[in-house]
């Protein structure tokens, strides 16, 4: 099972609103896939909304491929 998670970026160099989209396969540890900030979200969405959208798109692709997945964002189900 693939787990996709959205969380805030804890880096000291990150913008406070910056989010990370990360994945884990069967609890093997997290791997950052995308860092979403205002530079990406300038077309109307906030970074968290953009990151959640990216996570859902990844999930739809896995669903079509027949791969089980689950998604969370800041501790809540997507």
Image (tube, helix red, strand yellow):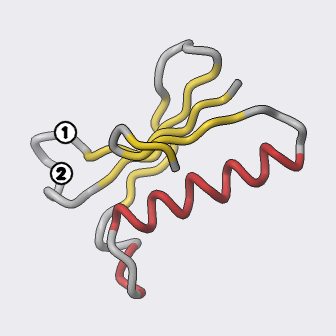
Q: Which residue is mark 2?
A: 14
The mark tally for this picture is 2
Rendered image: mark on residue 27: none
- Identify the residue shown where x is 45% and y is 67%: 50
Q: 57 or 42: which is nearer to us?
A: 57
Estimate the x, y position of residue 52 in percent, counting from the top left.
48, 58
| Residue at x 41% of width, y 67% of height | 49
The foreground one among 54 and 78 is 78
| Residue 35 % position (x, y) | 39, 52
| Crowd band around label 1 with a 10 angstrom C-alpha radius: few (<14), some (14–19), many (20+) | few
From the viewer's perspective, tell me whether residue 13 is left or right of residue 20: left
- Residue sitting farthest toward the bottom: 43
The furthest residue to the front: 77
Find out whether the residues at labels 2 and 1 contact each other: C-beta distance under 8 Å: yes
User: Which residue is painted at 46% across and 37% down in the image?
Assistant: 32
Indicate the secondary structure of the residue bearing disc 1. Answer: loop
68 lies above or below 73 = above
Q: Nearer the viewer, residue 18 or 71?
A: 71
Q: Residue 62 location, x and y as percent? A: 78, 43
Q: Residues within 10 Å of mark 2 (few under 14, many from 20)?
A: few
Residue at 26% across / 46% down in the picture?
Answer: 8
Q: Residue 43 at what x, y percent from top left?
A: 42, 86
Looking at the rendering, which quadrant does residue 7 occupy? top left
SS under mark 2 = loop
Distance in Å between CA atoms under marks 2 and 1: 7 Å
Residue situated furthest left in the rendering: 12
Q: Is residue 43 left or right of residue 67?
A: left
* Residue 13 in the image: above or below residue 45: above
Q: Nearer the viewer, mark 2 or mark 1?
A: 1
Residue beneath label 1, please? 10
Q: Quarter of the image containing the N terminus?
A: top right
């Amino acid at each position: 099972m693939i787990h996709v998670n959205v969380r805030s970026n804890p880096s000291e160099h990150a913008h406070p609103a910056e989010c990370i989209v990360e994945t884990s396969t069967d609890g093997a540890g997290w791997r950052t896939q995308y860092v979403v900030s205002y530079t990406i979200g300038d077309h109307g969405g906030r970074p968290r909304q953009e990151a959640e959208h990216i996570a859902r798109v990844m999930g739809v692709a896995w669903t079509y491929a027949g791969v089980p997945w689950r998604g969370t964002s800041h501790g809540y189900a997507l």
